[in-house]
Image (spheres, helix red, strand yellow):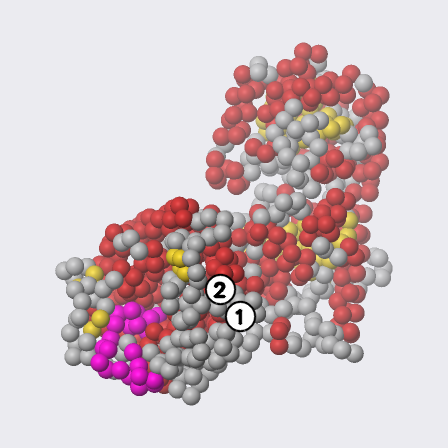
């Protein structure tokens, strides 16, 4: 392989030292091993940062990804695509990538133009929904998959239906060390003449070290010269969340058990040379992990390959590696069993040394020089497979594998529906209906549209005119005495209400928030910011969940630019908690929703949680929003797979009959927005497909096969009746379509293309 491989340029993607984690150590060692074994190859690394500013990386790290920044993943893919690479080798662990279950990495993979070999450091037996989605995406987007245990290979096939021919079994690499007497190293640590038990690795509660401490009194009763070394810094995630509480609890337990004179804690992340010396000094290595669901353990591989007698709980990697007298397994959380087996090995030198030799012999297959050759073989297979595909398939995309062409953006009807005061509320066919006047709801929508159009680069003068008119309307609609918005304004400019609804107020806050956070015009930012501050306090007094949701969306937009506003952040916390509590109080297995009735603008409730959860890093909030939206999308999908919104002619109450007509554009628009936010939060392209399905409702993929959008006028009909479309093209409907179209266009600008070529008939 060394002589014949044509793989020359390789990028290793994962974590990298000096970041302190097992994946960083593995990636660093694998890259170095491949570079050493194949000096003709150019190896570089792309590392993921979990802290602002990253780390002081060596020169081999050529690009850095910010863990929670989706755009950073896309930039990294762009960098690799122009770097003349033959292979990308991805190190996957759920916890090191951003997005739900680390889903941002899928967006990165979809962008890559070269073969990908993915090493799976974790294979879950009982994945959550997002974890399964990510794993299935990895399987689909990777040319080859590497696992480190036979069980991992079986699980990929049985649980995730991965093609067997796609999977390579390559052991965890280890340093090549000699089979030496532990006494050679002990004086370096001041433990000469003593029996050394060792556990090493980043410290966290799942390591089960307390069970070894509880076993020590029994061990010391027979072997008082034993010393137990616990080597490793506290895991950075554990340190951020809980500090040194776990280590402190272990120290307290050691004193309680009166074994503190026989326990040494080295709170350090040591380099490889020091680590080899620690391992060399050990007579027994102990891994007392608490659960079986660990498919790979680098610490176990290192100790085993160095020829150490190992006592371990039977997690998956240990059960496989230590079989056939290559180590000793004990039950989980069983201190007496640990004591019994440690004592048994220390009593029986012949057995202990036989176990060591068995481990060391197998370990020769795991040294990095051998592992590097196995990886290069996998790289070469991936290269050849992709080359064969390129000969067999055409790379053009069929209609079902490329973003669908969207209608032209036409603002002529909206212009006819707008005068110097604002947007008219209703139309008679495509003619403005003066007698119905204006409303704040529609002018809020118009202002939101103006910001989206600006981001799309539409005619600046036209956009500014629309923004100015609608912003002026919002400013006029706010009553500074009541701190509430009016809603309905007559054609002769008289307010027809004392104050508008709670939902109207929330929608106005949404528009003002987007003005602060995304408007390119300074004057609009300032006006919107002042009005937002005045109108926000009323929001927490409301009882309407939709008003909360509209307000949360506005808060999210506002905090894009003014993230340090403590009052606004506090309001987001309050409203998020209210929506979460409402869901918990109302949802049932057959009704995964916030209220007992589905009415209008439904998806906005889920969208608010998705935005808030993703922005604040509250996984539970994000998951709840996705859960609710997933249920709603299934409920509003017809048997023919098109979008079928809840009808306004009766809506849908839990336990009652669902109204299928009249279907409203506002519901399709809410679904488009929510699904696009879910796509941005998860990188799961299926959410984009759901958004496309909802958008297609406007252009004829619906129950009647009729277009709601009128290409001739640029307007949108007011609804879909049981036998026809509504002939009128009012502001709400037209703005719902235009906002949906603008959002779809913006999403297409970052939508990743499908990587795999599409087969055509030969």
Q: Is residue 453 above or below residue 684?
A: below
Q: Is residue 403 above or below residue 227?
A: below
The residue stretch that appears in magenta: 426-448
Relative to 108, 541 lies left or right: left
Are dots 1 and 2 in contact, CB under 8 Å?
A: no
What residue is shown with label 2? Answer: 636
Q: Residue at x 80, y 31 (%)?
A: 326
Residue 338's image quarter? top right
> Do we see residue 467 in this rendering?
yes
* Quadrant in which the C terminus is drawn: bottom right
**Residue 627: which disc?**
none
Q: Is residue 502 above or below residue 147?
A: below
What residue is shown with label 1? Answer: 642
* Picture coordinates of residue 724, whole percent (x, y): 43, 80
* Quadrant in which the N terminus is drawn: bottom right
Q: Is residue 728 magenta?
A: no
Front residue of this view, candidates 651 and 372: 651
Q: How many marks?
A: 2
Circle 1 SS class? loop
Q: Residue at x 81, y 61 (%)?
A: 5
Circle 2 SS class? loop
Relative to 255, 29 lies left or right: right
Residue 555's image quarter? bottom left
Q: Is residue 624 above or below residue 632?
A: above
- Upstream in sequence: badge 1 or badge 2: 2
């Amino acid at each position: 392989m060394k002589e014949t491989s044509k793989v020359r340029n390789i990028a290793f993607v994962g974590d990298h030292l000096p970041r302190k984690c097992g994946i960083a150590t593995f990636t660093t060692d694998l890259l170095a091993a491949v570079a050493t074994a194949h000096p003709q190859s150019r190896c570089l690394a792309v590392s993921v940062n979990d802290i602002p500013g990253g780390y002081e990386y060596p020169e081999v790290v050529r690009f850095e990804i910010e863990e929670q920044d989706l755009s950073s993943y896309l930039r990294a893919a762009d960098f690799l695509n122009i770097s003349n690479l033959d292979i990308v080798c991805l190190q996957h662990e759920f916890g090191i990538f951003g997005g739900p279950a680390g889903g941002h990495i899928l967006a990165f993979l979809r962008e890559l133009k070269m073969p990908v070999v993915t090493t799976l450091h974790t294979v879950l037996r009982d994945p959550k929904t997002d974890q399964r989605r990510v794993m299935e995406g990895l399987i689909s987007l990777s040319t080859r998959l590497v696992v480190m245990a036979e069980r991992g290979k079986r699980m990929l096939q049985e649980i995730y239906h991965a093609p067997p021919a796609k999977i390579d079994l390559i052991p965890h690499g280890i340093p090549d060390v000699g089979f030496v007497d532990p006494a050679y190293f002990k004086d370096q640590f001041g433990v000469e003449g003593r029996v050394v038990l060792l556990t090493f690795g980043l410290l966290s509660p799942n390591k089960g070290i307390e069970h070894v401490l509880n076993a020590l009194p029994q061990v010391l009763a027979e072997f008082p010269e034993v010393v137990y070394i616990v080597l490793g810094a506290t895991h950075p995630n554990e340190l951020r969340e809980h500090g040194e509480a776990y280590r402190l609890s272990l120290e307290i337990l050691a004193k309680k058990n009166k074994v503190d004179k026989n326990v040494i804690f080295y709170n350090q992340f040591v380099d490889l040379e020091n680590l080899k010396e620690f391992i060399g000094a050990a007579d027994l290595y102990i891994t007392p992990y608490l659960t079986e669901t660990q498919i790979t353990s680098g610490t176990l591989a290192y100790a085993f390959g160095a020829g150490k007698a190992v006592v371990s709980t039977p997690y998956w990697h240990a059960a496989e590696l230590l079989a056939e007298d290559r180590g000793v397994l004990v039950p989980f959380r069983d201190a007496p069993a640990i004591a019994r087996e440690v004592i048994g090995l220390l009593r029986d030198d012949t057995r202990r040394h036989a176990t060591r030799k068995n481990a060391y012999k197998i370990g020769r297959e795991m040294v990095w020089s051998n592992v590097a050759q196995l990886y290069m073989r996998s790289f070469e297979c991936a290269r050849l497979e992709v080359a064969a595909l390129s000969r067999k398939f055409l790379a053009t995309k069929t209609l079902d594998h490329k973003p669908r062409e969207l209608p032209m953006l036409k603002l002529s009807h909206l212009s006819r529906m707008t005068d110097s005061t604002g947007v008219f509320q209703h139309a008679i066919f495509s003619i403005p209906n003066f007698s119905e006047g204006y409303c704040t709801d529609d002018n809020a929508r118009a202002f939101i549209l103006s910001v989206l159009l600006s981001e799309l680069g539409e005619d600046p003068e036209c956009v500014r005119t629309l923004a100015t008119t609608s912003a002026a309307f919002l400013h006029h609609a706010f009553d500074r005495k009541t701190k509430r918005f009016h809603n309905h304004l007559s054609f002769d400019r008289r307010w027809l209400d004392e104050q508008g609804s709670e939902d109207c107020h929330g929608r106005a806050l949404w528009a003002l928030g987007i003005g602060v956070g995304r408007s390119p015009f300074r004057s609009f930012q300032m006006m919107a910011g002042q009005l937002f501050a005045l109108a926000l306090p009323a929001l927490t007094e409301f009882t309407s969940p939709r008003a909360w949701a509209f307000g949360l969306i506005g808060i999210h937009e506002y905090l894009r630019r003014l993230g340090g506003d403590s009052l606004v952040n506090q309001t987001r916390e309050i409203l998020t908690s209210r929506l979460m509590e409402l869901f918990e109080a109302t949802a049932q297995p057959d009704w995964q929703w916030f209220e007992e009735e589905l009415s209008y603008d439904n998806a906005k409730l889920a969208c608010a949680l998705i935005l808030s959860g993703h922005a604040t890093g509250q996984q539970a909030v994000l998951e709840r929003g996705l859960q609710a939206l997933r249920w709603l999308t299934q409920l509003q999908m017809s048997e023919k797979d098109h979008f079928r919104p809840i009808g306004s002619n009766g809506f849908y109450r839990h336990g009652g009959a669902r109204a299928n007509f009249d279907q409203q554009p506002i519901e399709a628009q809410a679904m488009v927005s929510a699904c696009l936010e879910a796509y941005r939060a998860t990188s799961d392209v299926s959410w984009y497909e759901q958004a496309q399905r909802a958008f297609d409702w406007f252009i004829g993929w619906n129950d009647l096969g009729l277009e709601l959008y009128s290409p001739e006028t640029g307007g949108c009909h007011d609804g879909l009746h049981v036998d026809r479309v509504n002939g009128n093209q009012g502001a709400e409907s037209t703005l719902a379509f235009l906002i949906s179209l603008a959002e779809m266009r913006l999403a297409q600008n970052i939508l990743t293309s499908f990587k795999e070529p599409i087969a055509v008939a030969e």
